[in-house]
Each structure stands twice: as C-alpha cells, then as structure tokens.
Image (cartoon, rainbow, N blue to C red):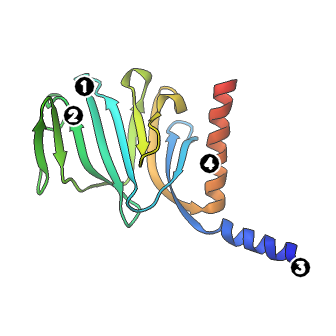
Amino acid sequence: MMLAAGLILAGALGLQPVHALVASDYRSARPVLVHRVAPGDTIALGFLHSVEQCWVLDRLRVDGDFSMVVVETEFASSRTGLPYAAFGQERYQREGDRFRIRNMHRRVPEIFQWVAGPYRNTLQINDNPQIRLSTLAGDTLLHIRIRKMSALSWSWLKARSYWHHRSNDHG
C-alpha cells in the first residue's frame, strides 16, 4: 500500500509544470544547457561583436509570463551592427568608454546566437557562475528559449545535457 502511494505521489510530482531556460544546438536540437527559471530571474548574455570587436552584454529578465525580456544592453562602440539610439521610454547613456541602453522592455520569444571560441560567448543566470557557451556546444548556432515542461521531462533533459557534457569532458 505504501509503495503504491509512493508511486502515485512520485508520478504526480513528475507531472508538475516546470519552466526552464533551454539552450540547444540548433542543428541537432540537442540540449546543452537546461536551467530552471522563475519570474524575476536574470539572464546575462555576453559576446565579442564580430565586426566591431567590442564586448556586448545583454541583460534579460524572466517576466511573470515566463518570457525573456531585454532590460538593458551595454557595449563599447556604436558603429556597425550595434545600437545607436534609445526608443520610447528607453535611456541611452554614455558612461566613460561604455554605452548603455536602460529601461528597455523588449520581449524576445527566443534567441539564436552563433557561439564560437573567439567570440567568448557567456551566459550567466542570476548570481550563478558565468558559463562559457562554447565549452558546452563548440562552434555552433544555439537556440535559447524558455520552455514549459513536466518535472519529469525537465529531469530527463537536465540529465541528458549533463551526461553529454560530461562525456565530452572525459572522452
């Protein structure tokens, strides 16, 4: 009787909804990063701009609908392919040798980002350690988004990305 109750409870818990930031290798759809997120969590994506060769840092927040919202971008140049102006209620500021656009509220359903060692792509969620994205997937196009799934699916994806990363480290 206790075993049956335990199995029912475990099954019910496995069906609970979970929201996770999932970064997948676009070509293979293989998840390389799976991290549970909640409203108010922050995400920082950094990279070396391919043309201007300057550091760019985008800060995002997870909103109450579990959407990613760009809230700020920071960069060292305002030339080719980089921001040049603020829109609406946004504030464009120069701080020493850096530029920032603050008070942004740009909702992005998903992000496609080319990741390669020379671009030093990074991802940081809240105050967790910064992750060098090329160490997870090599040189590839990453598809980054927040997905709603069951706790069981989240556990499976998390384990799959962990074991793949681990086998690449030790294989």
Question: What is the three-letter code of the residue carrying label 2?
Answer: Phe
Q: Which residue position is annotated with label 1?
A: 54
Q: Residue at x 49, y 43 (%)?
A: 23
| Residue 158: numbered disc | 4
Q: Is residue 106 visible?
A: yes
Question: What is the three-letter code of the residue carrying label 1?
Answer: Cys
Of the image marks 1 and 3, the number of the one nearer the N terminus: 3
Of the image marks 4 and 3, the number of the one nearer the N terminus: 3
Task: Answer above or below: position of 132 versus 10.
Answer: above
Say whether residue 16 is left or right of residue 23.
right
Tag count? 4
Farthest residue in the right direction? 1
Secondary structure under tag 4 reads: helix
Q: Label 4 to label 3, Cα distance in Å?
A: 31 Å
Q: Label 3 to label 2, Cα distance in Å?
A: 61 Å
Secondary structure under tag 1 reads: loop
Q: Which residue position is annotated with label 3?
A: 1
Q: Label 1 to label 3, Cα distance in Å?
A: 63 Å
Secondary structure under tag 3 reads: loop
- Residue 79 is situated, as x and y percent measured from the top left of the image, at 14, 28
Q: Label 1 to label 4, Cα distance in Å?
A: 33 Å
Q: Label 4 to label 2, Cα distance in Å?
A: 32 Å
Secondary structure under tag 2 reads: strand
Say whether residue 160 is left or right of residue 104.
right
Of the image marks 1 and 4, the number of the one nearer the N terminus: 1
